[in-house]
Image (spheres, rainbow, N blue to C red):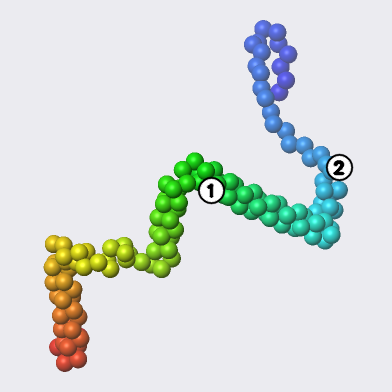
Amino acid sequence: EIVNDPSEQKKQMCYDVDVDVDDPLRQGMSQVLMSTSSQQEIVGIVSKIHETVDQINSLKTRREFFAQYSKEPQEYINQWLTSQSQDLQVMHDTVGNPENERKADFYCKPWAHEAVCRYFYRKVQTRRAELEQALGMRQ
């Protein structure tokens, strides 16, 4: 309803109207994307981008290594060896510090007696459960 009364206050309204308009580039872009040669070219370019990013990351890692090494060589090598040792322990699922565990002093600490008691208790309980199961005492 349109009202043209000067005494009435002006009202402002806003409407969203969807209008379909043909995009002249859409057809051209779809043809480029649908052609197999373009697909192969795009895959090749993406592959080159990934290779370039990998090379950049590798060069960045090398640069950081040499920059830190040049500042404090001895300290950096010690930290690097510690890091490599930890990585090796993770790779082999090693718990604890094998170098310290090779020495007898490691096992002469107060926790060792309790650890042995717990170990034997667990072994006795396991054997007891096996015996009870074999004799049919427990179901």
Closer to the camera in the image, 73 or 6? 73
Closer to the camera in the image, 122 or 40? 122
Instruction: Name which quarter of the figure residue 96 lies in.
Output: bottom left
Q: What residue is shown at x 75% (from left), y 58% (from top)? A: 43
Q: What residue is shown at x 25% (from left), y 67% (from top)? A: 103
41 horizontally vs 133: left or right: right
In the displayed orientation, state which residue is furthest to the front.
74
**Relative to residue 41, is residue 4 depicted above or below?**
above
Q: Residue type at mark 2? A: Pro
Q: Position of residue 131 (x, y in %)?
A: 17, 88
Judging by the rendered image, the residue that carries numbered circle 2 is: 24
- Depth check, mark 2 against mark 1: the one in front is 1
Q: Quadrant of the C terminus?
A: bottom left
Tag shown at residue 139: none
8 horizontally vs 132: left or right: right
Circle 2 crowding by C-alpha within 10 Å: few under 14, some 14–19, many from 20? few
Closer to the camera in the image, 62 or 52? 62
- Residue 38 in sight in this render: yes
Q: What residue is shown at x 86% (from left), y 48% (from top)? A: 28
Q: Quadrant of the N terminus?
A: top right
Q: Position of residue 123 (x, y in %)?
A: 18, 79
115 horizontally vs 31: left or right: left
Closer to the camera in the image, 63 or 22? 63
| Separation of residues labelled 2 and 1 (CA atoms) | 52 Å
* Disc with the residue nearer the chain's start (2 vs 1): 2
Q: What residue is shown at x 73% (from left), y 36% (from top)? A: 18
| Tag 2 secondary structure | helix
- Residue 138 in sight in this render: no
Q: Residue type at mark 1? A: Phe
Judging by the rendered image, the residue that carries numbered circle 1 is: 65
| Tag 1 secondary structure | helix
